[in-house]
Each structure stands twice: as structure tokens, then as C-alpha cells.
Image (cartoon, rainbow, N blue to C red):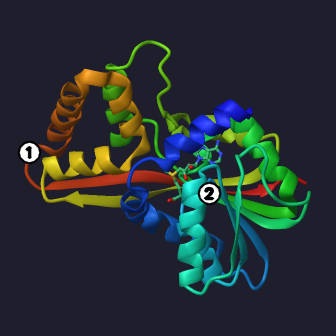
């Protein structure tokens, strides 16, 4: 990734109240950590780690854990949070195609809703393979290509000019596409579906959360300029339709958990 693209993505993910989003995603990090079990001193790297929910869950399970993310702000926050929790996690500012770590040095590369933002999925997977030892594992969570978040992102996309950058990581959530991307480097691919409940008092609160916490929504809001209220209304109307009412929101977000092993 060149310096200009890197600084753009850093700025994008450093905007907004990320702690709110991290809290909503955290249960999936625990599911991913449970899938790989206790580390017994083995080495793990959480990539596109944000503030490190998965890194923390792994460190708590005895993995010797490092974490990397492109956002300088989120890395700083993650470093402080881990230190405050008394967890030894080594933090790095690094994009997905330049991971910290010597070739073959790690037992696990993990990413919770992070690797899905790689501009080049194959490059990110090849880089993960580079740092993994033979027999090492990859664990990922991804959003399905046909779930609420994918549909809502498509609604936002109708407001953006052609060619405007939209965060659209949902191809990872097509299990066949994901398996094809993994295939050159990983085998024994296992994909299971899990559920993340997102509840809000009402649709207005949910829309407030999305436009305060989600970098994708903030970027779309900046891109549409004076149509921002129209954008918010369209996202709200879509949510009312999905939810069945403007009142209490009970979303059950499906996500995929992938576990794979380095191809011998
Ligand atoms: C939805 S957040 C998930 C963060 C974290 N894994 C969690 O569960 O809270 C996506 C993360 O991907 C990071 N990211 C996006 N593009 C990246 C890239 N090209 N290289 C490294 N990190 C990236 C963002 O900075 C952000 O922290």
C-alpha cells in the first residue's frame, strides 16, 4: 500500500467514536478466541486489530500476542487499554500487506472484522501465510454478503457519486469467494455462522450510533455534503423496514467465523 493510500485509510479509521463500535463487535472476538482455545505460550498476531478486542481475548487465553492496525489512533488506544488491563500485547502500526513478524514465526493470525478491509485480499492472505509457521492457523470473522450491513451499505452507496470509495467488505462473506481466496495458502477451511445481537432503544438511537461510531458512515456523510440528512433518513427508513417498526431495534446480525490451517 503506498504512503498516500495508507494515510487516507489511517485518517478514515481514526475518525469517529471507535470505542462504541468495538463494544458492539466484541462478542465476536470472544467467539473467535474460543475457537482457537488456549495458547499455552504460542504466538498470535491480531491483524487490523482496531483497539484489540481479539488480541486481549487471546492474551487472556495464554497466547503470546501482538496486534497490528493501520490506524495510529486505534493502536495508541489499544496499547493503553491492554496495559491498563495488565495484558502484555505488543502493538504495531502496520497495514495488512506488511505485517510485523519474521517468516514462519507465528502460530496464529487472527482478525475480527478487520482483514475484510484489505484492499487486496490475496496480498493480505499471502502476507498472513508468510508470518505463519507450518501448521499455523488463521481465524477470521466476516460479514455475510446478504445480511443487514451489506444491504444498508448498498443503500448508502446510492447517494455516492460513481467511483467514490465505499467500505464494502462483504465479498468476504460469500463463503465460496472466501474459500477461493484462501485456497492458494490455506487448507482445512471451516466456515461456521454465528449471531451478534445488536439492540437499540429505537431507530433514532441506532442511526445516531452508526453515524457517530462507524467510519464507513462518517465517510459517506462527508462525501454527500449537504445531502447528509437525506442519507440519514434513507438509512433510517431501511432500518425501520428491516426492523418492522421505528421502536425498539432488535437486529440479529449473522457473521461467519472461518478457521483454516496453513497449506503444507
Ligand atoms: C471494523 S474495525 C475492526 C477492528 C477490530 N478487529 C475489532 O474487532 O474491533 C476494522 C479495522 O481494520 C483496520 N484496517 C482497515 N484497513 C486496513 C489495512 N489496509 N491495514 C490494516 N488495518 C486496516 C481499521 O483501522 C480498523 O481498526
Q: Which mark is residue 111?
A: 2
Of the pair 71 and 67, the residue shown nearer to us: 71
Residues at marks 2 and 1, CA–CA distance in whole angstroms: 34 Å
Residue at image coords 50%, 25%: 165
Residue under the image location 71 percent in, 73 percent down: 65
Residue labelled 2 has its Cβ within 8 Å of some atom of ligand 1: yes
Tell me which residue sits at (53%, 75%) in the image.
Answer: 81
- Position of 82 compared to 132: left or right? left
Task: Answer with the quarter of the image where residue 39 lies.
Answer: bottom right
Q: Position of residue 250 (x, y in %)?
A: 20, 56
> First in sequence: mark 2 or mark 1?
2
Q: Quadrant of the C terminus?
A: bottom right
Q: Residue placed at 33% from the left, 19% from the top?
A: 158
Is 182 rendered above or below residue 91?
Answer: above
Determine whether 227 is above or below 136 in the image: above
Question: Which residue is the site of mark 1?
Answer: 245
As helix, strand or loop, the secondary structure at mark 1 comes to: loop
Amino acid at each position: 500500500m503506498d504512503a498516500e493510500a495508507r494515510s487516507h485509510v489511517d485518517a478514515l479509521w481514526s475518525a469517529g467514536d471507535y470505542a462504541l463500535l468495538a463494544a458492539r463487535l466484541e462478542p465476536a472476538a470472544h467467539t473467535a478466541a474460543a475457537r482457537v482455545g488456549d495458547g499455552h505460550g504460542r504466538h498470535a498476531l491480531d491483524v487490523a486489530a482496531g483497539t484489540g478486542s481479539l488480541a486481549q481475548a487471546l492474551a487472556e487465553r495464554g497466547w503470546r500476542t501482538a496486534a497490528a492496525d493501520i490506524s495510529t489512533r486505534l493502536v495508541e488506544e489499544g496499547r493503553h487499554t491492554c496495559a491498563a488491563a495488565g495484558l502484555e500485547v505488543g502493538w504495531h502500526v502496520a497495514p495488512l500487506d506488511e505485517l510485523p513478524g519474521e517468516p514462519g514465526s507465528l502460530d496464529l493470525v487472527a482478525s475480527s472484522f478487520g482483514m475484510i478491509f484489505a484492499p487486496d485480499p490475496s496480498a493480505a492472505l499471502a502476507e498472513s501465510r508468510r508470518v505463519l509457521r507450518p501448521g499455523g492457523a488463521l481465524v477470521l470473522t466476516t460479514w455475510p454478503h446478504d445480511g443487514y450491513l451489506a444491504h444498508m451499505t448498498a443503500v448508502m452507496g446510492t447517494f455516492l457519486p460513481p467511483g467514490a470509495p465505499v467500505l464494502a467488505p462483504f465479498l468476504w462473506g460469500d463463503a465460496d469467494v472466501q474459500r477461493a481466496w484462501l485456497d492458494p495458502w490455506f487448507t482445512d477451511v471451516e466456515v461456521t455462522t454465528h449471531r451478534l445481537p445488536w439492540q437499540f432503544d429505537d431507530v433514532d438511537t441506532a442511526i445516531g450510533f452508526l453515524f457517530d461510531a462507524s467510519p464507513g458512515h462518517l465517510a459517506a456523510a462527508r462525501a454527500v455534503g449537504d445531502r447528509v440528512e437525506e442519507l440519514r433518513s434513507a438509512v433510517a427508513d431501511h432500518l425501520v423496514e428491516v426492523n418492522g417498526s421505528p421502536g425498539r431495534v432488535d437486529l440479529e446480525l449473522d457473521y461467519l467465523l472461518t478457521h483454516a490451517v496453513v497449506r503444507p
